[in-house]
């Protein structure tokens, strides 16, 4: 069956959800752990050395020792992975980690504060549930990626997976559900279930209810049966899980269909959930010759409608407010470092015509993304800047300003020297993720940032029976 060709003509509602089942998670035993908040951590790829040290000191059983075990003096090659596996075995034998008695869907609430368009703060709750999803290769079924993956990261995660023999962090998957019927089904079953709560260092409150009610679990599974899944985060770990399944299958000479290694632990969130927030990922760039605002406008030519803002560098919040209110992928703000001026630029029809030439193999949705316009048209074509270092990615305008002022502690630094260019750009929307995934395309790097990140340590999925 040529699914690849069919998907180009399908909407999400016409596809079939991969198999999702409850599982008996391995979890921290609160008889041994004073507070779950002390032992959880964000995903490994957002943890730097300083924060790794903070987590190490917080609790001797913090999950950091598993997901990102640090190198110690005298370590041999690969010893961090074997040491991580040793902690898992030790914590299980000591009762620090204990497997649940029966399979469950783990209903999850993440409650957090975000800023609105006018700068006001509001409290939001994102609802989802954790289950296990049957693995299938990207492009061969109904699990769809939207970001590129890097070989180095996959090699690292595969080594950890082989050593620990468990999913240590969940994949983040999205599914279409106009009425939020799946999550409401599980919500109705939580009344008599005692929740477990943890607060992370960003102030996000994570609450989990293990739902074992057979009627609720069965109904939720049935409601999911006609829905596809789009990977929001965890592409490297998903592909690694597929590689590990193939490795185990080859080593064993075949495995049963219900073998745990055929599944991956996944947090599933409905695409219409009111708490589903996508933050922007702004760019700070070194290695580009500083431009004056008039020169920048000249280089952009007639492809962008441009307006300079008064107020110098500090006009960034005003620029971002304008972009948010316009809510258009075509509108972005570029920083001309030579005269410290922000320029509002809006891609017009000539810009889109040029994008059709530069990215003729990509869909119109891909070509219309703000990040695509920025990297493909502005940087590569108009400014002819292709050899600059990887951008520094930040999510708050305050971090953009901190980076431009040289306050690198406030920004995710990617090198030395001053930033000579910056861009405020809209994030791709959930709808963009869906359409580009169905087109079998991959977005430019850092097109989406689903906030908040999922916790590592709230549950583990053992892969070897």
Image (cartoon, helix red, strand yellow):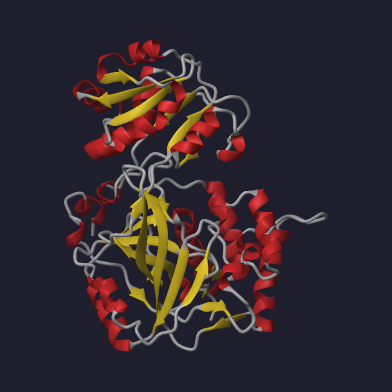
Image location of residue 119, percent across then percent down: 36, 43
Q: Residue 27 is drawn in which quadrant?
A: bottom right
Left or right: 170, with 152 as reference point:
left
Residue drawn at the location 32% of the way across and 88% of the way down: 214
Left or right: 280, with 34 as reference point:
left
Specify the quadrant that holds the N terminus: bottom left
Residue 460 versus residue 427 in the image, above or below: below
Question: Would residue 305 be visible to someone looking at this image?
Answer: yes
Image location of residue 102, percent across then percent down: 45, 87
Q: Residue 383 is drawn in which quadrant?
A: top left
Image location of residue 369, percent across then percent down: 30, 37
Nearer to the camera, 282 or 143: 282
Residue drawn at the location 45% of the way across and 42% of the way down: 395
Residue 294 versus residue 1 in the image, above or below: above
Left or right: 459, with 146 as reference point:
right
Question: Would residue 254 be visible to someone looking at this image?
Answer: no
Residue drawn at the location 48% of the way across and 34% of the way down: 400
Nearer to the camera, 116 or 462: 116
Q: Residue 61 is drawn in which quadrant?
A: bottom right
Residue drawn at the location 57% of the way across and 66% of the way down: 40
Residue 400 versus residue 182 in the image, above or below: above
Image location of residue 283, percent across then percent down: 45, 33
Nearer to the camera, 241 or 123: 123
């Amino acid at each position: 069956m040529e699914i690849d060709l069919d998907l180009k003509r399908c909407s999400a509602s016409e596809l079939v959800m991969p198999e999702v089942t409850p599982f008996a998670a391995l979890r921290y035993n609160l008889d041994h752990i004073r507070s779950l908040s002390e032992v959880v951590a964000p995903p490994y790829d957002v943890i730097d050395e300083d924060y790794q040290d903070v987590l190490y000191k917080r609790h001797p059983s913090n999950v950091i020792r598993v997901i990102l075990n640090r190198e110690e003096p005298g370590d041999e090659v690969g010893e961090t992975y074997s040491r991580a596996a040793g902690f898992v075995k030790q914590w299980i034998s000591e009762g620090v980690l204990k497997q649940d008695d029966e399979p469950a869907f783990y209903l999850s609430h993440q409650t957090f504060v975000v800023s609105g368009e006018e700068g006001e703060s509001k409290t939001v709750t994102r609802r989802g549930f954790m289950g296990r999803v049957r693995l299938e290769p990207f492009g061969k079924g109904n699990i769809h990626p939207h970001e590129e993956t890097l070989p180095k990261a996959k090699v690292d995660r595969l080594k950890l997976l082989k050593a620990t023999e468990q999913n240590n962090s969940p994949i983040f998957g999205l599914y279409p559900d106009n009425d939020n019927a799946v999550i409401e089904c599980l919500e109705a079953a939580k009344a008599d279930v005692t929740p477990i709560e943890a607060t992370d260092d960003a102030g996000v409150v994570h609450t989990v209810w293990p739902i074992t009610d057979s009627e609720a679990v069965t109904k939720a599974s049935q409601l999911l049966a006609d829905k596809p899944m789009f990977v929001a985060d965890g592409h490297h770990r998903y592909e690694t899980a597929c590689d590990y399944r193939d490795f185990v299958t080859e080593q064993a000479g075949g495995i049963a269909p219900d073998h745990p290694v055929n599944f991956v632990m996944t947090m599933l969130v409905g695409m219409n959930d009111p708490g589903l927030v996508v933050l922007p990922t702004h760019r700070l760039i070194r290695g580009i010759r500083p431009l004056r605002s008039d020169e920048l406008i000249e280089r952009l030519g007639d492809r962008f409608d441009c307006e300079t803002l008064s107020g110098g560098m500090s006009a960034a919040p005003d620029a971002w407010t304008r972009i948010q209110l316009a809510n258009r992928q075509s509108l972005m703000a570029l920083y001309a470092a030579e005269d410290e001026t922000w320029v509002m630029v809006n891609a017009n029809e000539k810009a889109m015509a040029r994008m059709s030439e530069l990215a003729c193999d990509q869909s119109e949705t891909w070509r219309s993304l703000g990040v695509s316009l920025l990297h493909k048209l502005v940087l590569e074509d108009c400014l002819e800047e292709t050899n600059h270092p990887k951008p520094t990615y930040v999510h708050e305008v305050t971090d953009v300003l901190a980076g431009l002022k040289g306050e690198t502690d406030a920004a995710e630094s990617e090198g030395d020297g001053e930033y000579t260019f910056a861009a405020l750009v809209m994030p791709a929307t959930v709808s963009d993720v869906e359409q580009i995934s169905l087109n079998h395309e991959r977005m430019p790097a850092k097109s989406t940032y689903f906030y908040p990140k999922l916790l590592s340590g709230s549950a583990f999925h053992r892969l070897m029976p």
